[in-house]
Amino acid sequence: MTKHRELSTPKDATAFDFSGPATYRVVVQGTLSKDWYGRLGGMAITTSSQETGSPQTILRGRLEDQSALHGLLDTLYALHLPIVEVTKVDHPSGKDTKARERRKTR
């Protein structure tokens, strides 16, 4: 017999609205040409080097909803670019929300 566990929502998760447009910052390991601008929802593309010397690409921009974010992450996955961090940003000025999802590569 299979046991089923109920999923619970963190108490602070209800404070965030993910149904509408939001600005996101996505960091991937590796480099991505600025030619991908149109395919990646018009996200700004910047490449930098980590302390370890390995390059990272930072994507930043406004997406219409969670479906658009999913599509962006799907495209990055298809390109075999490990996703290091996904951050929902309150304002285009760069102030991050407390809701941060980190996916670290292993």
Image (spheres, grey):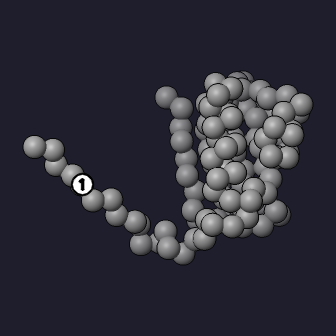
Outermost residue, right side: 35
Front residue of 65/29: it is 65
The crowd level at tag 1 (other Cα within 10 Å; few <14, some 14-19, many 20+) is: few
Q: Residue at x 80, y 46 (%)?
A: 41
Which quadrant: the N terminus? top left
Front residue of 95/14: it is 14
Front residue of 34/40: it is 40
Task: Tell me where residue 23 appears, x and y as whole percent.
Answer: 75, 59
In the image, taking residue 34 as reference, residue 97 lies left or right, namely: left
Task: Tell me where residue 53 appears, x and y as whole percent.
Answer: 72, 24
- Dividing the picture into quarters, in which one does residue 37 lie? top right
Q: Residue at x 54, y 75 (%)?
A: 15
According to the image, label 1 marks what residue?
5
Q: Can residue 41 be seen here?
A: yes
Task: Tell me where residue 64 appears, x and y as whole percent.
Answer: 74, 59
In the image, taking residue 2 as reference, residue 57 lies left or right, namely: right
- Dividing the picture into quarters, in which one does residue 85 lie? top right
Q: Amino acid at mark 1?
A: Arg
